[in-house]
Image: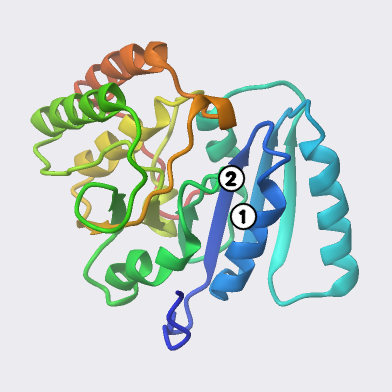
């Protein structure tokens, strides 16, 4: 359960949610993010959904605007499907908060973990916080080969970034906004996960890892990542870890 006593100490939180064909879960994840009571704004980036998700979001966005709630729901739309990475980049560019948190729309990750994810940044000891499904906490038992693949990709990323993460691919990644805005990101699809890790490592950011709960879903219930994305991730890890990025100036938007 979310700790109602958690204090953001005047900092504003932007939650960025990339969405593609999640009509069965989108209302519930938005309800849970709102219930966490920490977001200043929720930016939902619809990546050209075709299953009715966009229509649900348009209704919710209009209802929020009319209701004048404390949390602002902002709907950003892609007219063609570009992938998770491009959706996150759209959300990052639009975020106005001091802290930016990535939330998937599929109910695999619980917004009740926000206080633990935010605390190292709020306390001033971290620039970036990454969740881990493997440190502790409840998680659904699913695919062995996914687990093994994740371990391999995280190890490869660690070798090249000189970090000691346990879950590089975890959805939950939280950034001080001024750090995030210094990055020039390129990924369109799931390569955004290793790209973000490589770039913040290259910046010398203070990175913390905290345990999160995980309620994984199977392919019958809409899981999208496949073995081809795993193979692509190897290329992305090598690409981003072995190249130096162009960087924005600290005050550039």
Residue 168 spot, x, y in % from top left: 26, 38
Res 246 seen here: no
**What whole-number distance in Å separates the C-alpha atoms at marks 1 and 2?**
6 Å
**Residue 86, percent across and down?**
56, 30
211 or 173, which is in the foreground? 211
Disc 2 residue crowd, few under 14, some 14–19, many 20+, Cα 10 Å: many
* Residue 123 vertical position relative to residue 213 in the rendered view, above or below: below
Q: Badges 1 and 2: C-beta atoms under 8 Å apart?
A: yes
Side of 44 relative to 119 (left or right): right
Find numbered disc 1 in the image and state the secondary structure of the residue it sits on: helix
Q: Nearer the viewer, residue 33 or 8?
A: 33
179 is higher (above) or lower (below) than 227: below
* For residue 65, side relative to residue 193 (left or right): right
Residue 185, placed above or below residue 25: above
The label shown at residue 29 is 1
Q: Earlier in the sequence, mark 1 or mark 2?
A: 1
Identify the secondary structure beneath mark 2: loop
**Residue topped by disc 2:** 105
Q: Residue furthest bottom?
A: 5
Name the image quarter holding the N terminus.
bottom left
Residue found at x 73% / y 28%: 48
Residue 38 is situated, as x and y percent measured from the top left of the image, at: 53, 73
Determine whether, in the image, residue 161 is placed left or right of residue 234.
left
Q: Quadrant of residue 184?
A: top left
Q: Nearer the viewer, residue 211 or 124?
A: 211
The colour scheme is rainbow
Q: Is residue 218 in sight in this rendering? A: yes
Count the marks: how many?
A: 2
Q: Residue at x 66, y 56 (%)?
A: 28
């Amino acid at each position: 359960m979310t700790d109602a006593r958690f204090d953001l100490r005047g900092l504003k939180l932007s939650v960025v949610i990339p969405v593609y064909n999640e009509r069965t879960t989108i209302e519930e994840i938005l309800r849970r993010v709102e219930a966490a009571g920490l977001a200043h704004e929720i930016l939902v980036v619809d990546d050209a959904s075709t299953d009715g998700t966009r229509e649900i979001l348009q209704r919710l966005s209009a209802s929020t605007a009319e209701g004048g709630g404390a949390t602002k729901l902002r709907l950003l739309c892609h007219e063609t499907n570009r992938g998770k990475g491009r959706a996150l980049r759209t959300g990052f560019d639009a975020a106005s908060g001091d802290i930016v948190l990535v939330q998937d729309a599929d109910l695999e990750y619980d917004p009740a973990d926000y206080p633990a994810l935010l605390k190292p940044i709020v306390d001033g000891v971290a620039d970036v916080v990454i969740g881990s499904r493997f440190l502790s906490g409840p998680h659904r038992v699913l695919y062995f080969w996914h687990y093994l693949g994740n371990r391999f990709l995280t190890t490869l990323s660690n070798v090249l970034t000189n970090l000691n993460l346990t879950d590089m691919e975890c959805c939950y990644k939280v950034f001080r906004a001024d750090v995030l805005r210094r990055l020039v990101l390129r990924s369109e699809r799931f390569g955004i996960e290793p790209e973000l890790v490589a770039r913040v490592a290259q910046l010398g950011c203070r990175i913390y890892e905290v345990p999160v709960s995980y309620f994984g879903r199977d392919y019958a219930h809409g899981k999208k990542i496949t073995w081809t994305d795993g193979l692509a991730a190897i290329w992305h890890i090598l690409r981003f870890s072995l190249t130096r990025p162009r960087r924005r100036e600290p005050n550039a938007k």
